[in-house]
Image (tube, rainbow, N blue to C red):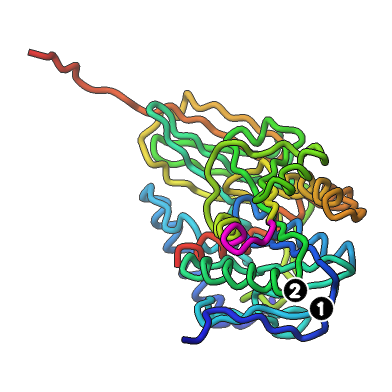
Amino acid sequence: MPEDFSIVETAPTKVQNPYVLVGIPDIGLVGSIATSHLIQALGMSEVGHLESEILPPVMIIRNSEPKPPIRIFSKNKILIVAADVAVPSKAISPMAKKLTEWSKSIGAELIVGVSGLAVPNRVEIEKPAVYGIGTTDETRERLKKLGVPVFEQGVVVGAYALLLKEAIKQGQPNVTLLAEAHYQFPDPGASASLLEILGKLLDVKVEVKSLLEQAEEIRIKTRGLWLVERNLSSM
Amino acid sequence: MARRKKSVFDVIEEFRRQVDSMFEKLGEPLVEEPPMYDVGRKELRPLTQINETEDEVVVTVDLPCVSKEDIKMEATDSLLKIDAPVRECVKFGPYGPVQRETEFDTFRKVIKLPALVKPKMCKARFKDGVLEIRLPKKIGGVRIQID
């Protein structure tokens, strides 16, 4: 039986024990905004993409060039899997399985999921807190050392939940970071908080000043992606 | 005075506005969600979230690049209309179906409320570009006795 997902490497990704960062549009577009900022800030290059017949029939046009909707970027020890469209629910499970298998096959040190935690009083929160979930004692200890509060009780739903499930099943360490965010609106402030923690975890310098300065503009310009997220996630 | 010949898109857009206006007059907005913009009128439709409690309808509206003093709101017992000019024109490069430079100068939306409300008792607050309007529900009726 053919696999639902395959990973196409268009450039060499021979990195020793990389971090595989996954950014998929969901709550507050936190993961999408954070990964997109990181790709730009670190000057990462495109090295591959995901292919699947169960993804929506979508191609993204960037600078006149058609691109697949889920692409892989690389720089030093970091690989980013960034989705430009929401992943429909039927594609989430096979995608999580494939991404985890692939991460394991390239000896990834960690899969890092980046997402939002919908809070009802987001307007009252000046600086969103970031919580971490680790799939092993070691990853939880690592979060503790970085001063990241552990997400103790609750429910994770969607792509990040299945990435956690697959990580446990396949024995691939996974850390998922959740920043307090608006549920219905793009939230660059939450992405900035998340990037500060991510910088510590990945040991890279990430400036978030520009992200915060452009926050209002980003909120306007990511509205289209937000609508696509809402429409496609129900497919 | 020179007049540009109307394209088929102009005619469709004009027709849509007429139908919108007709429905607004009837007290029912035609479209709640997409389209997210009206290029001809330079209007963006803001993202909104509507929650209902037992006694309130709470509408939250994302209004980045807007100043509190510029927001205008009107409410009836079933509709909420929001007009909010942006501080500076928002410019978009070619994107999606609009493959030309476009600019928008205001957020505008008419929201159909999920329950009847008391418009005179609405309360609103605005922080960090997010507007929250709390509209008390019209709850009334005849007291029922238990036999």
On residue A13, the disc is 1
Going by the numbered disc 2, the residue's amino acid type is Ile
The residues colored magenta run A166-173
**Secondary structure mainly formed by the magenta segment:** helix
Q: Is residue A170 magenta?
A: yes
Q: Is residue B31 above or below residue A101?
A: above
Say if mark 2 contacts mark 1, CB within 8 Å.
yes
Q: Quadrant of the C terminus of chain B?
A: top left
- Residue A79 spot, x, y in % from top left: 79, 68
- Residue A17 spot, x, y in % from top left: 81, 67
Residue A164 appears in the figure: yes
Disc 2 sits on a residue from what chain?
A
Between A135 and A45, the residue placed more toward the observer is A135
Between A207 and A20, the residue placed more toward the observer is A20
Disc 1 sits on a residue from what chain?
A
Residue at the limit of the structure toward the left, as seen here: B147
Residue drawn at point x = 57 percent, y = 69 percent:
A97
Give the total of numbered labels: 2
SS of the residue at dot 2? loop
Tell whether B142 sits left or right of B116.
Answer: left
Between A6 and A28, the residue placed more toward the observer is A6
Do pointers 2 and 1 mark residues of a single chain?
A: yes
Q: Is residue B143 above or below residue B95?
A: above
- Residue A28 spot, x, y in % from top left: 64, 50
Q: In which quadrant of the rendered view does residue B76 lie?
A: top left
Residue drawn at point x = 72 percent, y = 57 percent:
A112
